[in-house]
Image (tube, helix red, strand yellow):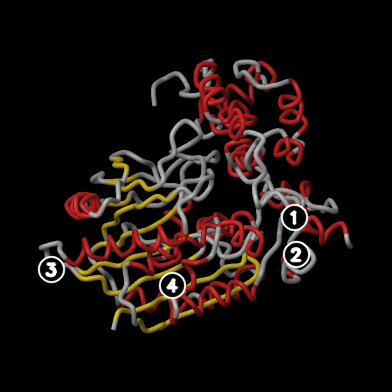
Amino acid sequence: MAKVIAGMGTSHVPGLGAAMDNGKTQETYWRQLFEGLQPLRAWHRTNVPDVNIIVYNDHATEFSLDSYSTFTIGVGETFKPADEGWGPRQVPNMSGYPNLAWHIIESAMAEEFDLAVNASMDLDHGFTVPLSIAYGQPKEWPTSVIPVCVNVIQHPLPTALRCYKLGQAIGRAVASFPEQINIGIWGTGGLSHQLGGERVGVVNPDFDKKFLDNLSRDPLANTRISHTEFMREAGCEGVEMIMWNVMRGALEDDVDEVFRLYHIPVSATAYGAIILENK
Amino acid sequence: MSSSCRYCFYRDPLVLNDLLGRYYFGFGNFMERDYDDIPGTYPLDSRTYRKGYHVNMFLMSLNNVECRNKFAADEQAYLDTFRITEDQKRAVLDRRFLDLLKLGANVYYAFKLISFDRQPPQVMYGQMAEPRLTFDEFQQMMTDGGRPIDGNRSIKEWNDG
């Protein structure tokens, strides 16, 4: 049977991808952050799963006001980096893993989770930046991926609890998948940030720290946070943090926190990363 | 994507808007939300969805290189292929990002315009900020730890100074 080995949470700020793509990681603005990420990258070098299920959101790239499903799963054989307005990032295409993606769809549907199915979605910075954070700039990515897109930009959004339950459903689907493969699950986005309006630039380290602490030791506490509380306390776009609940839901109740990094600023964002291993 | 831009051509959402307006958003459009008292914040919800539909779809069209080329060739003419209001058109042409949000644009869509200009997003952030900040001033605010949450949770806090 397949097995979830670990979960990672990370912000997916586009500036991080641009810093790597343009060779700026040693500049003063970036050096401290990328030094802080060295242990995360070392962990990823020794813990390479067969498939990473990556929970992300699309930023008016593939989905829009015309059609934006609450949860969408990618069943394609390959995925391309998207053109978000400045041309696609020059990173390798990503290989899908349709067998498991379809198994998740069937298993989740039986639990009354109706995932929208997409075979051709291009993946924007919300997806590709976490890959670069974990794996740097390889010629090809070391794992297959399954994209799970969550609507966190067009209200009404799924609740924090719904996201956690989706993660649990994904965890059960993986556990009943007959191939002997290892799975990683990533939650992306956040942490506190607001990108629009007069309040742009607001961050909240206390809120973020509590969220990360809860993720480790009391994950259900993070399922009781309303969207309004996220937006008020962690900025309008801080509500992206509900995607980390999907990741957490797919893990066991007791986990080992093996890495954490918190850094302000990355662009207008409080950057956070965490790695949680199943025991 | 076909040779013609997916979002360049006139898409008539009259039927959609009319149905939504009459049967669902007729009252919902004006309904208050519990996040309305968060200051300087413009979430994309059913109210902004309708107000900003066309301008957001224009902004999203800039994902496509052919559309970017058309916009670069003649901004006004390209804008005229979308059914957006004169206020929205002027805000686009003048790059008044805060006004764009007030007129229904969402910040994730507005990114496409600042990217089109090959400007870093901090230029847009600084222009929207209260008080208005230059690129360097916005960077400095973030490097100093960002805008503090205390005093910025509600309009009441803003009004009470």
Residue A77 percent location from the top left of the image = 23, 46
Amino acid carrying label 4: it is Leu
Same subunit: marks 1 and 2 = no
Mark 2, residue position: B147
Q: Indicate the quadrant where residue B115 lies.
A: top right
Task: Please give the residue where the numbered disc 1 appears in the rendered image.
Answer: A199
Q: What residue is at 40 percent from the left and 58 percent from the top?
A: A162
Secondary structure under the numbered disc 1 in the rendered image? loop
| Residue at mark 3 shares a chain with residue at mark 1 | yes
Q: Quadrant of the N terminus of chain A?
A: bottom left
Between A27 and A30, which is closer to the camera in this rendering?
A: A30
Contact flag, marks 1 and 2 (Cβ < 8 Å): yes
User: Few, some or many C-alpha atoms within 10 Å of disc 3 (few <14, some 14-19, many ≥20)?
Assistant: few
Tell me which corner region of the image, top left, top right, bottom left or bottom right, holds residue B52.
top right
Mark pair 4, 1: CA separation: 29 Å
Distance from Cα at disc 1 to Cα at disc 2: 8 Å
Q: Judging from the image, what secondary structure is the residue with disc 3 in?
A: loop
Can residue A65 be seen by looking at this rendering? yes
Residue under the image location 61 percent in, 57 percent down: A228
Report the mark closest to the observer, 3 or 4: 4
Q: Residues within 10 Å of mark 4 (few under 14, many from 20)?
A: some
> Please, what secondary structure does the residue beneath circle 4 have?
helix
The residue indicated by pointer 3 is A1
